[in-house]
């Protein structure tokens, strides 16, 4: 199963992806299903559920605030 | 063809720039930040690469603070108009391009703002940063919101003391907007060290990218307001533009070919090294200054500043006429006022403008010799 950390913009999702990749966490930038967001088109990084803690910590350490984390 | 109009736009472009644009147009030019297919993502990744390259080159805070624009004028308009409110006062140098002067004039006429000019002292033999900063300090009022300065005017090579002006802005709690049009790619500009709040850049001049590329880089505290409104590929159900940079200021489809070309230009530039480029251009300037000064009837303006731009006139021959005569000899320079009447006022060339020759890393000493030979011939015709 994968989670998606949703970001306000594509650029912030890309930045998050590069930060996470630098920590050897495999992620993929994805467009989030628009029906699952309240504001329409959104972007995020998808990752394996086993990486949830590492993703949260890495994002926090780099002052990157995801809007929410949802199941893919 | 000898091309000496690099202050208008650099030419030729490095082969890597041409190759990357062609690759983009044939292999991956999807619409970045819109769809979720491979070509859209490929384009978006290349665009993010360019944000990172610009962020690193100018020591900006973060890649998301890099906003792509059509050119430096577009970037300056976003920065200046973001600060427009009734009563706002701006301070800018007395040698600003129309890309600064005209937005300020518009805001003064239509939005209740005002502006004052500080003395850049570019024609003062004893110019120093203290004199310039004193001039700025004397103009600060309670309602002043920002100081705007070019990194270097477009008709001479007099660099502005950005570190010192930035420090003054920090002490005075003012925003600092820099027009990097003639500085970027010619000498180091460091947003952190110079306390620059907003840096406007053309991609197609010293950064060696294609026309149609440009950027505004802002500090996180800079209060941005969109100049254009529309699709941003994010939060599509909202009626307002998103709050987050850079999408907040990038309505509509970005020019992916221009941006990937810009990134290739930055790579080419970095492989040579900005310091090396600056030194090369200064040598060409000094050679040009020495040769042109020896010609009867030629006046070189602000000759003590060596850099990428040299301006001069031949007595009695209009600058545009000189440029046309050089064009007949396959030498490209620019005559007239260079969209900068303020700087021509300061240099004393306000009546007829000047002939401007401007260098790139690809010019050689032979180009300068050819320029001097042609000017000698044109001047001889006048003095025969």
Image (spheres, coloured by chain):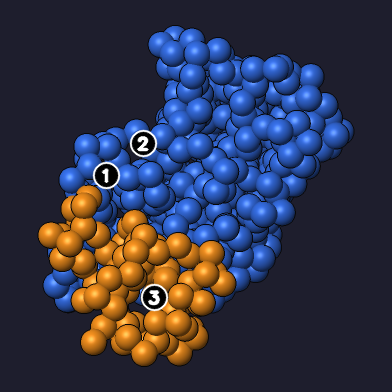
Chain colours: A orange, B blue
Tell me whether marks 1 and 2 sit on the same chain. yes
Asked if residue B164 is positioned above or below residue A70 in the image, the reply reads above
Residue displayed at 46% across by 31% down: B82
Q: Can residue B53 be seen in this view?
A: no
Residue A68, percent across and down? 34, 64
Chain of the residue that carries numbered disc 2 in the rendered image: B
Q: Which of A16 and A6 is in front in this view?
A: A6
Chain of the residue that carries numbered disc 1 in the rendered image: B
Residue displayed at 64% across by 17% down: B143
Residue displayed at 51% across by 77% down: A57
Report the side of B83 relative to B14 (left or right): right
Q: Regarding mark 2 in the picture, which secondary structure is present there?
A: loop
Query: Which of label 3 and label 1 is nearer to you?
Result: 3
Asked if residue B384 is positioned above or below residue B61 in the image, the reply reads above
- The CA distance from mark 3 to mark 1 is 23 Å
Q: Which of B240 and B299 is in front in this view?
A: B240
**Quadrant of the frame with the N terminus of chain A:** bottom left
Residue B261, percent across and down? 34, 65
The residue carrying mark 2 is: B226
Report the side of B169 relative to B51 (left or right): right
Chain of the residue that carries numbered disc 3 in the rendered image: A
Q: Where residue A17 is drawn, which disc sits there?
A: 3
Displayed quadrant of residue B258: bottom left
Q: Which comes before the other along the chain, label 1 or label 2?
A: 2
The residue carrying mark 1 is: B251
Residue B75, percent across and down? 43, 41
Q: Is the residue marked by circle 3 packed among few (<14), some (14-19), or many (20+) residues within 10 Å?
A: many
């Amino acid at each position: 199963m994968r989670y998606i950390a949703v970001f306000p913009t594509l650029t912030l999702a890309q930045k998050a992806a590069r930060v996470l990749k630098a920590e050897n966490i495999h992620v993929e930038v994805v467009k989030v299903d628009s029906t699952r967001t309240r504001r329409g088109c959104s972007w995020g990084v998808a990752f394996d559920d086993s990486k949830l803690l590492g993703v949260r910590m890495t994002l926090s350490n780099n002052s990157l605030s995801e809007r929410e984390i949802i199941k893919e | 063809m000898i091309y000496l109009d690099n202050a208008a736009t650099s030419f030729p472009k490095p082969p890597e720039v041409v190759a990357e644009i062609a690759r983009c147009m044939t292999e991956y030019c999807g619409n970045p930040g819109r769809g979720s297919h491979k070509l859209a993502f490929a384009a978006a990744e290349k665009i993010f690469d360019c944000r990172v390259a610009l962020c690193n080159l100018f020591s900006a805070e973060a890649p998301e603070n890099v906003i792509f624009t059509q050119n430096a004028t577009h970037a300056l308009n976003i920065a200046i108009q973001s600060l427009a409110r009734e009563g706002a006062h701006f301070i800018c140098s007395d040698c600003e391009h129309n890309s600064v002067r005209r937005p300020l004039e518009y805001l003064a006429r239509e939005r209740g703002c005002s502006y004052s000019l500080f003395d850049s002292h570019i024609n003062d033999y004893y110019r120093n940063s203290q004199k310039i900063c004193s001039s700025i300090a004397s103009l600060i009022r309670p309602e002043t919101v920002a100081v705007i300065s070019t990194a270097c005017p477009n008709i001479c090579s007099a660099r502005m003391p950005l570190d010192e002006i930035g420090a003054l802005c920090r002490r005075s709690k003012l925003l600092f907007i820099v027009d990097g049009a003639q500085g970027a790619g010619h000498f180091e500009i460091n947003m952190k060290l110079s306390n620059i709040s907003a840096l406007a850049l053309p991609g197609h001049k010293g950064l060696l990218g294609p026309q149609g590329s440009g950027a505004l880089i802002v500090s996180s505290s800079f209060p941005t307001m969109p100049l254009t409104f529309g699709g941003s590929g994010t939060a599509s159900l909202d009626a307002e533009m998103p709050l987050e940079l850079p999408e907040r200021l990038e309505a509509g489809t970005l020019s992916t070919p221009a941006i990937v070309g810009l990134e290739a230009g930055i790579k080419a530039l970095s492989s040579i090294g900005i310091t090396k480029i600056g030194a090369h251009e200064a040598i060409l300037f000094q050679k040009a200054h020495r040769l042109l000064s020896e010609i009867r009837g030629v006046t070189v303006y602000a000759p003590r500043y060596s850099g990428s731009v040299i301006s001069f006139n031949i007595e009695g021959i209009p600058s545009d006429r000189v440029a046309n005569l050089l064009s007949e000899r396959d030498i490209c320079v620019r005559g007239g006022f260079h969209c900068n009447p303020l700087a021509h006022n300061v240099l004393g060339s306000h009546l007829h403008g000047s002939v401007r020759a401007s260098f790139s890393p690809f010019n050689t000493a032979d180009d300068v010799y050819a320029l001097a030979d042609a000017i000698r011939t044109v001047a001889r015709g006048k003095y025969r």
